[in-house]
Image (spheres, rainbow, N blue to C red):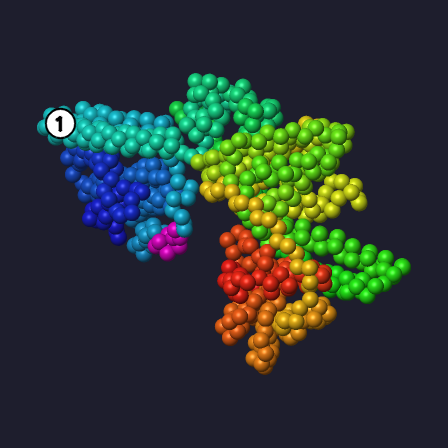
Amino acid sequence: MVISSFPLAIALVLPLLLREGREKLEIGWLQVLDVLQFGIIVFSAFLVFFYIPSFRTISDADRARDLTVLHLTRDSFLALGYLYRGSRSRFPDLRRLHFQMAGFLAAYGSVALLVFHAFNAWHWSRPLTSFIADLPPLFLLITAVTWQQEKDPRRGAISYGRDGLLWTQLLAAIMPLSVLALASRMTGPYLQGAWIIVTASFACYAARLFLMQRRQEQTLSSLAGMEEKFSKAFKSSPIAIAISRLSDGKYIDTNDRWLELTKLPREQVIGRTSLELGVFENEEERSKILAAIKKQGFLRSMPFSFRVQDRILETLVSAELIKLEGEPLLISSILDVTELRSLTHQLQQSQKMEVMGKLAGGVAHDFNNLLTIIKGYSELVQLRGLEGDMAREVRQIREAADKAAALTRQLLAFSRRQVLQPRNIRLNAVMAEMEQMLRRTIGAKVELVTSFATDLGILYADPVQIEQVVMNLAVNACDAMPFGGKLLFQTKNLDISVPYPERGFELPPGRYVMLVITDTGTGIEPQTLDRIFEPFFTTKEAGHGTGLGLSTVYGIVKQSGGYISVDSKVGQGTTFKVYLPRAERTADAIQPAEKVPENLSGTETVLVVEDDPRVCELAANVLANHGYTVITANSAEEAVTRSDQFAGYIDLLLTDIAMARVTGDELAQRLGSKRPGLKVLYMSGHPHFSLSGNIADFREAFIAKPFSSSELARAIRKRLNRAEAPLAAAHSFTSSK
């Protein structure tokens, strides 16, 4: 027969000795010892039931029968071995393979027994018996050809618990006792062989115990290492982790971050439930989470409002069911995302304000050009000596243009694109000069209270813009106190070494001068607080406000390098806090106002450069009416060409700053190199200055759009009258488109 030889049987024994779960094949010594014990049992059974009795038989038929029984015993031993390995295998592929091999060996033994009887007792023909004998190998061949291994051999792996381990140890203890029972039936001349067999069996069992003890020590050492790693990771984790019993919900352990998050001592937490600690407001919330965990065995990043004393934290909860000593436990982790969501909200608010600022600034730029034309020509018309209804209508046009110009200035303030004229100032001095005006503004119903720090630091800011901040906040407070109240102004120094959290932002470390404005008015609704600095947002009735007051304050403070926060409670009042960076300087002396020129006419030559032809034409008409010789250009390139073509002396360059391709200051540099005596006056409706904080002193070198014809003539005359270096102002900034 094909596999009747014992060498092939040895080949079938070798897979039973391999160890599972390794990247490379290794001998599994526990399996070797178990298979060896099986071999001793089978060999002992063979001696007792077949070999020793065979000496009492002498016929060939009996010997053939004994040989067949020996082969059947061998195959039964192998089949039992594969059944044992299949039942103990943790992987489905190996279990299937071992069970199929056991089935093959059982079928092969049964067919061998059938062939023996068919050939010797029933005298079947040799071809028929040979065909029957080849059926088991054919089954083995078909199994090998059709075998398909799973893609993930570890999927569906079985882990055996305490019961499986006890059964394995019990089976290992029964086997040497079985050998002892079989050897006790060997008497007489076979007694020495019986002692050898028993000794070998118990030696295998002793070796197995020794090997099990070694592995147990290794396992305990590995578990201790894993426990130490888990303990350190558990305690040092930045995520709050807690372990509680599933049965009653009582906490049995928490890490340091969990205690830090809840601000509770460990002894107060252990042995109590989440309901007792107030984490859940009611039992339904906990039941909802437990139902989700029991349904799928775990929970991943479920949003949950975690209640900690008087605070509510926005968290993400994850949980897993585990078993410890047979008791189901719940290990839960809590990630606090309150600060992350707050920062995300701050970023969104900042981006929104930035986009709105760019939009407002862009609108103001184009609108100021139109207002310059309206204001300029309306004043030129008025200078013609109109009377009656015509004069009144033109005056209304100019007043409307002035109001529109004020709105654009507020838009520029919000978008942080206005030109500031900073000084080293004392905030207390600014507030003292405004006190009388503030009292007239707020009226008799509102009590004005001031509290100024005596050692207040110096600010580097535009005093006019700071006055506008104070006035706008005062007016806003008065509107919130229609029936009267108290308005408090405070100034103080603030030094912080770590970031200080405020509503909507984080105040960086530094030295600040703080202005606090508190009213006892109606307060602001919580849902409105995040929008109060947006332009055109107002809670007042139509016609009672433009919605630009607070947005102007916001823009001025931010452009001055400061911060502003608001805190309000409905029915109790509102507090605004303005943080401005402190300057380590001395206050500037107050300069007397320069005398306005009485005669605005002149005979000098002025080069006017403006990319809006209508504004350029207006400026040329105004200057021509005042006696100046005017050269016009609608671009920097055209201005250079006109300058080169003009042989006379050019006294002043009047140029727009933001022009396509070549900007106003670049043009001034080009012309200044050719005409050393050239003076410059800049104009813009939306100054795009690349300066530190967009702050520069352009009192004598800049005129803002929209301007009237008289304002333009006055600025031209003042600039020409100054005896300073012609291009000094041009070097004080760098412009960008």
Mark 1 lies on a secondary structure that is helix
Which stretch did the figure color magenta?
Answer: 141-149
- Left-right relation of 600 to 541: left
Q: Please give the name of the residue rendered at 50% of the width and 32% of the height, measured from the top-left corner.
A: 455
Question: Quadrant of residue 721 in the image?
Answer: bottom right
Percent of width and height locating residue 327: 44, 24
Which residue occupies the foreground of this view, 662 or 325? 662
Q: Position of residue 139 (x, y in %)?
A: 36, 51
- Please, is residue 351 above or below residue 183 in the view? below
**Image height of 416 relative to 665, above or below:** above
**Is 533 positioned to the left or the right of 455 in the image?**
right
Read off the residue under disc 1. 195
All told, the count of numbered labels is: 1
Q: Is residue 305 magenta?
A: no
Q: Position of residue 576 (x, y in %)?
A: 62, 36
Tell me which amino acid carries mark 1.
Trp
Dividing the image into 4 quarters, which one contains the C terminus? bottom right
Query: From where the camera sits, is residue 223 visible?
Result: no
The quadrant where residue 610 appears: bottom right
